[in-house]
Image (cartoon, helix red, strand yellow):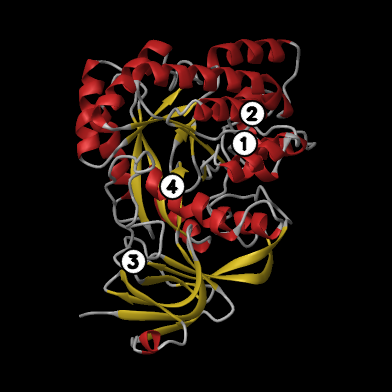
């Protein structure tokens, strides 16, 4: 049975164009677009017609950095693949790329299989995987080639968290050299974890135990130093590099310098660094623990550099690093010792709305909103043009977005499985109204109509942003 949907009368916004057009969807894909009111659009017929008059029609968001069900610090991220992908859909995101984890001493395959088992049959939207490489050895390097062939084309390494995920410079160089050969992309958590551990030990010895000290020990200079080192190691290896969750002026400067040299170096930032600051980490009565993530929130003056980086394309992507831990029972593990607060924040549901607010506030244009939230992450991680745009042949991952609706972000109304909102009480303009995933309605006029298991695993090609 063929199924057809027409979305009529909206302003279709992609990374490259804005046009008043009707969109014809057939069998889960975009079949055609035609200017609204023309005979071509009038010829579109379908069982389901969605009126998008006065609204935007945009590609579903692609969140290239999430951690559902991630084990960390003796607990687990609070969102499962079921709850997390449902919340993503509510927020207009129709594809996530999550991180499978290699445990030290185990194979990449074992880690990847474990994450497939968590996600399969549980997701409301489509998903892919990156691979966290915690143990670089000859076997791991061979496995990287096999994973690239089967559509896991990016590998994350950590210069932070000694004893957990940490890789030294030699391990990083070997993995980068492998990616230079097999087409994979290294994603780097760039913080000098060895130096940070010294500062953590010294702070705790001085009795500095509150959440705000998390930000003080994870210094911006140590993010910049690690970013610089990662860039130079990638240059030696002849490999591209993607630096995750960039938060500091000094780190942006390192990326900009490398890009001015013509190096294939890319950076993402996250909404928390654009909208929150160390003021939140310093909230009294341990409330600051809600905002503990790594890289940490920075003083407010860093925000302007991040927005500028997004406008100049020294930063290309906004992802969430969604890794939620409840305040009660999880964040509280760090009472009396900030180093024991699970690192991570909720945000998968808020990203598209917060970035629309950035359009309203004049930080970015409408097309740049779609570029950094949909098109570029799809290209960066080998999903384009199946994901990230509205064009014939693309998956019908479509959001009807009301740019005039106002809402107040709150834990009482969000759908993430976490007991607080990082943006509690924030008033924003713009709201998701209807979401289609491969042509199927997941959110219909602000009602959830999706289902667990609709979302399918999506293998990825190598990075298309280099072409």
Q: What's the mark number on residue 140?
A: none
Locate the C terminus by quadrant: top left
Classify mark 1: helix, strand or loop. helix
Q: Residue 176's x, y, as percent?
A: 34, 22
Q: Mark 1 and mark 4: span between their CA atoms?
A: 30 Å
Q: Earlier in the sequence, mark 3 or mark 1?
A: 1
Crowdedness of circle 2 by 10 Å Cα count: few (<14), some, many (20+)?
some
- Residue depth check, mark 2 versus mark 4: number of the one nearer the observer: 4
The residue furthest front is 261
Q: Residue 57's x, y, as percent?
A: 49, 70
Give above or below for 75 relative to 26.
Answer: above
Mark 3 — residue? 438
Relative depth, front residue between 388 and 129: 388
Q: Mark 1 and mark 2: span between their CA atoms?
A: 6 Å
Give above or below for 328 relative to 132.
Answer: below
Q: Earlier in the sequence, mark 1 or mark 4?
A: 1
Mark 4 — residue? 377
Q: Earlier in the sequence, mark 2 or mark 4?
A: 2
Relative depth, front residue between 41 and 276: 41
Q: Mark 3 and mark 2: span between their CA atoms?
A: 42 Å
Mark 1 — residue? 331
Relative depth, front residue between 64 and 342: 64
Q: Earlier in the sequence, mark 3 or mark 2?
A: 2
């Amino acid at each position: 049975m063929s199924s057809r949907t027409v979305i009529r009368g909206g302003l279709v916004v992609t990374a490259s164009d804005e046009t008043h057009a009707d969109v014809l969807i057939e069998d889960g894909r975009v079949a055609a677009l035609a200017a609204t009111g023309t005979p071509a659009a009038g010829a579109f017929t379908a069982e389901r017609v969605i009126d998008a008059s006065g609204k935007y029609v945009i590609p579903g968001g692609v969140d290239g950095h999430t951690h559902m069900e991630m084990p960390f610090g003796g607990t687990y991220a609070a969102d499962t693949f079921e709850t997390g992908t449902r919340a993503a859909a509510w927020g207009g995101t129709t594809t996530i790329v999550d991180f499978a984890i290699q445990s030290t001493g185990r194979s990449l395959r074992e880690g990847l299989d474990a994450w497939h088992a968590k996600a399969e049959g549980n997701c409301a939207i489509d998903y892919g995987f990156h691979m966290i490489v915690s143990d670089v050895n000859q076997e791991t390097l061979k496995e990287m080639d096999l994973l690239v062939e089967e559509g896991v084309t990016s590998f994350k390494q950590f210069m932070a968290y000694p004893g957990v995920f940490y890789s030294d410079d030699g391990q990083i160089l070997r993995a980068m050299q492998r990616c230079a050969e097999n087409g994979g992309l290294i994603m780097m958590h760039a913080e000098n974890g060895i130096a940070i551990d010294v500062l953590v030990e010294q702070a705790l010895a001085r009795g500095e135990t509150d959440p705000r000290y998390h930000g003080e020990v994870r210094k911006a200079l140590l993010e910049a130093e690690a970013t610089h080192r990662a860039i130079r190691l990638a240059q030696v290896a002849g490999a591209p590099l993607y630096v995750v969750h960039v938060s500091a002026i000094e780190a942006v400067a390192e990326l900009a310098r490398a890009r001015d040299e013509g190096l294939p170096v890319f950076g993402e930032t996250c909404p928390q660094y654009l909208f929150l600051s160390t003021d939140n980490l310093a909230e009294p009565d341990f409330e600051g623990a809600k905002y503990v993530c790594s890289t940490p929130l920075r003083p407010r003056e860093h925000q302007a550099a991040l927005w500028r980086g997004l406008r100049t394309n020294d930063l290309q992507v906004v992802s969430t690093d969604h890794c939620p831990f409840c305040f009660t029972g999880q964040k509280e593990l760090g009472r009396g010792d900030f180093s024991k607060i699970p690192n991570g924040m909720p945000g998968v549901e808020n990203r598209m709305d917060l970035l629309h607010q950035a359009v309203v506030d004049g930080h970015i244009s409408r097309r740049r909103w779609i570029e950094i939230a949909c098109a570029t992450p799809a290209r960066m991680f080998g999903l384009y043009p199946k994901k990230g745009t509205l064009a014939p042949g693309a998956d019908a991952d479509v959001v009807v977005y009301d740019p005039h609706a106002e809402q107040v972000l709150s834990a009482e109304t969000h759908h993430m499985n976490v007991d607080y909102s990082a943006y509690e009480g924030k008033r924003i303009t713009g709201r998701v109204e209807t979401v289609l995933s491969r042509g199927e309605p997941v959110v219909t006029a602000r009602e959830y109509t999706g289902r667990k298991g609709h979302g399918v695993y999506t293998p990825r090609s190598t990075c298309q942003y280099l072409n």
